[in-house]
Each structure stands twice: as structure tokens, then as C-alpha cells.
Amino acid sequence: MNNQDTKKNKKDWDIICSRCARCCYEKIDLEGEIYYTDIPCEFLDLETNLCRVYAERDSKRPGCVHLSRENIKKGFLPADCPYVADIEGYPAPRMEDESDTDDL
Ligand code: SF4
């Protein structure tokens, strides 16, 4: 694959994102279950829903996860994210206001 193809593939991959920014909110892991909080990443621009430091996010925000075909299956993207729409049995995180009492 040449450099041109790599750039095209990256563009095709990036364009899947609908820019909802939901994945840019803090998540917590409670006994193996991931919950979204309502706390945005400090670098998320709440007006545009875009990262303010996208090009240098690795240094500004160590731990920021780059989406890949493999790691999107781990269950940190919301159920309505287009990247996971076709993954059967996708283990979507829960929203902060969801609790087990919802099932009662
Ligand atoms: S949750 Fe999915 S669609 Fe929303 S910003 Fe993240 S990657 Fe994009």
C-alpha cells in the first residue's frame, strides 16, 4: 500500500465519525462495566464538538485512544456510534444516569 492509499484509508475511516463527541467524555469502569460520565475531556471544544489539540493529543493527553478496527470492539464507544453499528453483540457502555434500578 502506498502513501496515497494510506491517506485515503485514514480519510475514509475518519469520515465515519458523526462528531457527536460522546467518546470524549470521561468514562469510569465499575466492576468491569463501563459508564459514561457528563465530564468532557478538558480539550473538547463544547461549541464545535471537536478536539482542540487533535494533532498533538498524544502528548497533551496521554492515554487518548486512537480508534482502530480492533479496539472499537472493546466497548468504550456509545451504542449509536457509527463505528460500532455493525458489530453484533457490541457491549456498549452505560450512561451515567443508567443504573440497575432501571430494570426494576
Ligand atoms: S462516539 Fe463515535 S461518532 Fe461520536 S465522536 Fe466518538 S467516534 Fe465519533
Image (cartoon, rainbow, N blue to C red):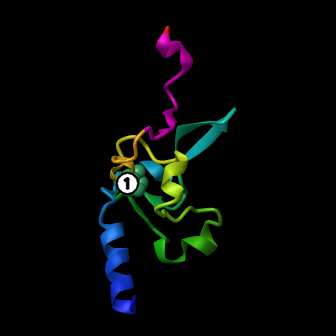
Tally of numbered tags: 1
81 horizontally vs 65: left or right: left
Residue 99 falls within the magenta-colored stretch = yes
| Quarter residue 8 falls in | bottom left
Residue found farthest to the top: 104
Picture quarter with ligand 1: bottom left
Tell me if residue 2 comes above or below residue 28 in the rendering.
below
- The answer as to whether callout 1 falls within 8 Å of ligand 1 is yes
Disc 1 crowd, CA 10 A, few/some/many (<14, 14-19, 20+): many
Q: Amino acid at mark 1?
A: Tyr
Residue 29 on image: x %, y %: 65, 39
Residue 24 on image: x %, y %: 48, 53
Q: Residue at x 48, y 33 (%)?
A: 95
Q: Main secondary structure of the magenta part?
A: loop
Identify the magenta region: 89-103
Tell me if residue 15 comes above or below residue 47 in the rendering.
below
Residue found farthest to the right: 31
87 horizontally vs 65: left or right: left
Please give the residue where the numbered disc 1 appears in the rendered image.
83
Residue 1 on image: x %, y %: 40, 88
40 horizontally vs 30: left or right: left
Residue 53 on image: x %, y %: 49, 71
Is residue 46 among the parts visible in the rendering? no
Residue 63 falls within the magenta-colored stretch = no
Q: Residue at x 46, y 48 (%)?
A: 77
Is residue 101 among the parts visible in the rendering? yes
Q: Residue at x 51, y 38 (%)?
A: 93
Q: Residue at x 55, y 18 (%)?
A: 100
Helix, strand or loop for disc 1? helix
| Quarter residue 4 falls in | bottom left
Give the camera-side residue of 5 and 22.
5
